[in-house]
Amino acid sequence: MILYLILLGFVVAHLPRFYRFVQEVRRMKRLSSVIPGDEGVFFAGHGFEFGMDPQVMPHRAVARMNRTVKESGVQLMKLWFIHENVYMPTNGETVKYILDSNDEITKGVEYDVLVPWLGTGLLISTGDKWKSRRKMLTPTFHFSMLDGYLAIMNRHAKICTELLEDRAGTKVDMYPVVKMCALDIICETAMGKELDSQRHANQPYVEAIVNLMSLGTKIAMSFHLWTPLMRYLLGIQQSYDRSLIIAHKFSKSVIDERTEALKRGEVESNKRAFLDLLLELKEQHSLNDEDIREEVDTFMFEGHDTTSSGMGWIVWCLACNPDIQERAYEEVMKVLGDDPDRDLTREDMGQLIYLERCIKESMRLYPPVPFASRQLQNDLQCGEYLLPQHSNVSVSPFVIHRNESIYPNATQFNPDNFLPERVASRNPYDYIPFSAGPRNCIGQKFAQYEEKIMTALLLRRFRFKSDGPLSSQRFAAEAILRPIDGINVMVIRR
């Protein structure tokens, strides 16, 4: 009898919430029915079609997108996953509604897995906190600050080429090579700390960062790992927590060291790291040590994994297109001249026009962040359709960049897609590797500098050759677009 009463009380207490949930889903279904397209199978929606396999899902999303556009002309896909309503804009004109919104800036729940590591820094925060942080941090990525990072980028890119010399003439997985280089660059520019992971990859901090990225992705993509209990039973949470302790301890120790160095006047004005700028803003913006750690760890995450993904795919695209690679090399040599040790300057980068087109085309085909999401806090008018509150909008550079109505022969690598006249004929939001609008990537210019420097200095020293065609490379759409088998290419000394 007591158990019955407890159960009855539980049902009665939750009945109003369940009623609101049912009403909300019914409203979503009603608004969804106006948009052309099916709603999947009963109950599961499109769950079986898309699945949770990060290798399969992006291909199915692109196939459905191109089919939807051809059949109905509507540049908006509606998807259902049980009760979850997801909308996916498929061109720049449609995605602009969400990206230009100053109110709909809340990320989807899949970002929650990053909160224990990154806290609610710029990547994850929303509302007033995000707006104040964005306003505070934007000046730290001014051109004058970025110019101070160029020497660091050049130095680590040269170390990368020097270490590759010993492996010339062999097949090399370039993904970990560029990943360690990117990690060294972001560690020194963000923290002012020389990590030297390219020579010493087995450091605890390096291993912790790699493990956090791997486990975070695994948790986000696996239904059975969404509950803490299952993660603990399988030992995954314990491994994640150990890496988390190491990463946070390292960040905090660097913050303490840098704070003392600034007090003693030991940091040269032209060698300031991102952390130094945060420490200078500490009192003005009432930041505590945890606030600073959040932002430093956020930039360590965003500035290393996304850039290494971008760099890996650039190498792969050039290795699979030797004629294009040779033309890019000739341009690099024309700009840099015969001096094998000369750094790449900002003025040089402005002259590497064809190389820039190659990099942009690589990021069109293989955007480092293939999918991102926003959870609507209010109804959103998207052209003629009303997207309901609490539904999700999936912003997918991967899908938009492979829209055949925008990019003919969309799966081919063609740098001419970025000739000025072709760019002018497209909506600016048809190409969004760094997102767009108020919540675009604050570090995109930093990433563009780094990728151009690393690519140019690698091409100056080596030629890359692939055994297979561009399409032979398998990838997974995780937090970043990860090459499953690495970027295995022949490295040939020039």
Image (cartoon, grey):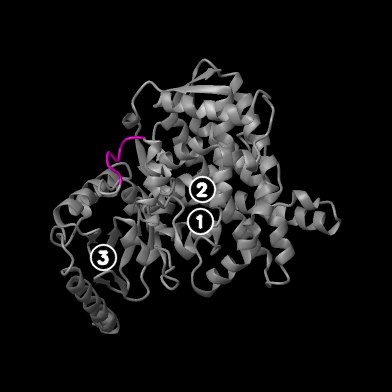
From the image, tell me which residue sits under label 2: 212
Residue placed most toward the observer, 385 or 304: 385
Q: Are marks 1 and 2 in contact (CB under 8 Å)?
A: no
Mark 2 vs mark 3, CA separation in Å: 29 Å
Residue extending furthest toward the top: 169
Secondary element under disc 1, as helix, strand or loop, is: loop
Q: Is 87 inside the magenta-drawn segment? A: no
Tell me where the magenta segment starts and ends, as one range: 407-413
The residue most toward the front is 421
Q: Quadrant of the N terminus?
A: bottom left
In the image, what residue type sits under mark 3?
A: Asn
* Residue 38 placement, left or right of 491: left
Q: Is residue 371 above or below residue 482?
A: below
Identify the residue at image location x=36%, y=35%.
413
Q: Amino acid at mark 1?
A: Cys
Q: Nearer the viewer, residue 282 or 247?
A: 282
Q: What main secondary structure does the magenta stretch of the protein show?
A: loop
Mark 3, mark 1: which one is toward the viewer? 1
Position of residue 313 measured from the top left corner of the image (x, y, whole percent): 44, 36
Q: Position of residue 47 (x, y in %)?
A: 22, 54
* Residue that mark 1 sits on: 441
Q: Give the structural element (helix, strand or loop) at label 3.
A: strand
Give yes or no for contact between labels 3 and 1 (Cβ–Cβ under 8 Å).
no
Q: Which residue is mark 3?
A: 85
- Label 3 packing within 10 angstroms: few (<14), some (14-19), many (20+): many
Q: Residues within 10 Å of mark 2 (few under 14, many from 20)?
A: many
**Quick check: can you spot residue 204?**
no
Q: Is residue 368 left or right of residue 70?
A: right
User: Tag 2: residue type?
Assistant: Leu
